[in-house]
Image (cartoon, grey):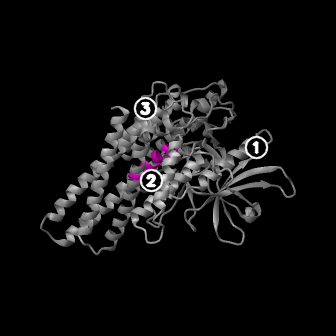
Amino acid sequence: MSGVELGLASFAAADLVLKYGRKLIKLYKDYNSADDYVKESILLVEAILSRADTQVGFLKQVNDKLSNDQRRIQFELYEMLKDRLHFTVSKLESVISEKGIRKVKLAFVKSSIKEVVEQLERWQRIFDPTWLLIFRTRDIIMDTELQTELEASSRTGPVGESIAAQASRETLGEAHAFRRIVNGELDQVHVTLPQEKLNWSQAESVSFSSTQIIERIGSQKRYLVNSIPCHSNMDIASVRADSEDLARKLHQINSEDCGLLACYGLVKRRNSGQKKINSLDLVFQMPQKDATPVTLREHLMQPQTFSLTEALNLSRHLAGAVSYVHAYHFVHKNIQPENILLFPKNEPNTSLGSAYLLGFDSFRSVNFQTLFEGDITWEGNLYRHPGRQGLRAHDKYVMQHDVYSLGVCLLEIGLWASFVQHDSGETAPGEALGLTVEDFGKIQETGKPSSFIKDHLVRLAQSKLPVKMGDRYTAVVVTCLCCLDEDNEDFGGESDMRDDDGILIGVKFIGKVLMRLNEISI
């Protein structure tokens, strides 16, 4: 389809999504249930659909500024949700119209609305990164249209406004905040925190992670902290500017569903009486006041005690976090289980809890040149693309390198086996990895990029994953591991993905990884 045809098809599907959504709400309300769960769920469905309505309205105004890849991904997302809502409407109408016991019907209604809420929330987690990528487009029309829509949504005011009006105001407000990031309008936002306000001497370590938990002095409030050491061979000014930029971007996060935590601020730590900065410390809000996080690494070293559905949801959330990282236009550079923190839910011990990506001590902005220094640790090279392995990396760090690292993590999650074992302070390759330290040593001796590790991981995925997670999950993992291969049909290889504004790789990732993970049913 041409760009115009894609746009028209996308909006036609979007209009049907809203139509079926409103019909569902009417069916639930007409059922006249006094059940509190049903009432609360109806409000949630209304809020999500109102957000979608606002987004569709804005997209119609700026459709000619979008690429065909963006239009295509939106069309596919609306089509996916349209079909699911249509099926639910038909089933619900059939059950409600039948003669039968009301108690049985109520059970179906509750089950139906629970499923609808889950579908809408999952869909929104995929769509929102595509929504943010729209605002990476550098065109004054974006600012003009956004300002017009924002002013219109603000006329009602927060007092006594409807769910739709509130959703519209919040959705456009978030977009405006993100647009300010893109336009570099947050440079004056203050993010520096005084180091004496945190109790550094009582810092609590998170097992197998560089992340620390630190209390605020005079308060029981706790924060997660990632420290970036400032060595003499570093360009401190660039690292400082990069860190401040990241802190400002992550300070804007207001939803824990994206797999990233809001940044409270940045501490520039110095020794007493000295001007030299020893470290730059990113301080993050804790998602739960009293909960203590556990790394994915620690979980992987334990037997699996939860369902495959939970493992799949963990993979989806992690992929979503990577999508947001790229939407904010920086690369993480250190995606591995030690930097994925899970917070337990108030549910049985079999629940994995909510997952968040941290470990930002190695990140960089896409706009800054990457350092080519690496290291020779085998466990570090395990999660690095061949072009980034060794003491002297050969390739500039790009977003696809994060996608590769994600692929290794998804492989571990799918197999539920740790590729790294910790014992008495020593690390060793896990049995499931099927490699030895000596195997990694052979690569380091050559000093040249080698696809040995990558090829081994691809074979491992193709031989072991299908019986555990199915063919579709396996295909996603292999796509991630091979994302920089020149013959890769999904990403097109490195030469086809030169992407200064980060939009193309972001859209490709959503379509080829995030959407495919969310299409899997277990």
Distance between the alpha carbons at the discs numbered 1 and 3: 38 Å
Instruction: Return the disc, 3 or 2, that comes first in the chain's sequence.
Output: 2
Label 1 residue SS: helix
The magenta stretch is: 122-135
Q: Nearer the viewer, residue 171 or 226?
A: 171
Apparent side of residue 470 relative to residue 505 in the rendered image (left or right): left
Q: Quickly name the residue at label 2.
A: 304
Residue displayed at 68% across by 48% down: 243
Of helix, strand and loop, which mostly describes the magenta segment? Answer: helix
Q: Quickly name the residue at label 3.
A: 490
Distance between the alpha carbons at the discs numbered 2 and 1: 45 Å
Distance between the alpha carbons at the discs numbered 3 and 2: 31 Å
State the image coordinates of residue 26 (x, y, percent, origin top left): 26, 64
State the image coordinates of residue 224 (x, y, percent, origin top left): 63, 59
Mark 2 crowd level (few <14, some 14–19, many ≥20, 10 Å Cα)? some
> Which residue is at the far right?
273
Q: Quickly name the residue at label 1.
A: 237
Res. 114 mark: none
Q: Is residue 304 above or below residue 46?
A: above
Give amino acid for label 3: Asp
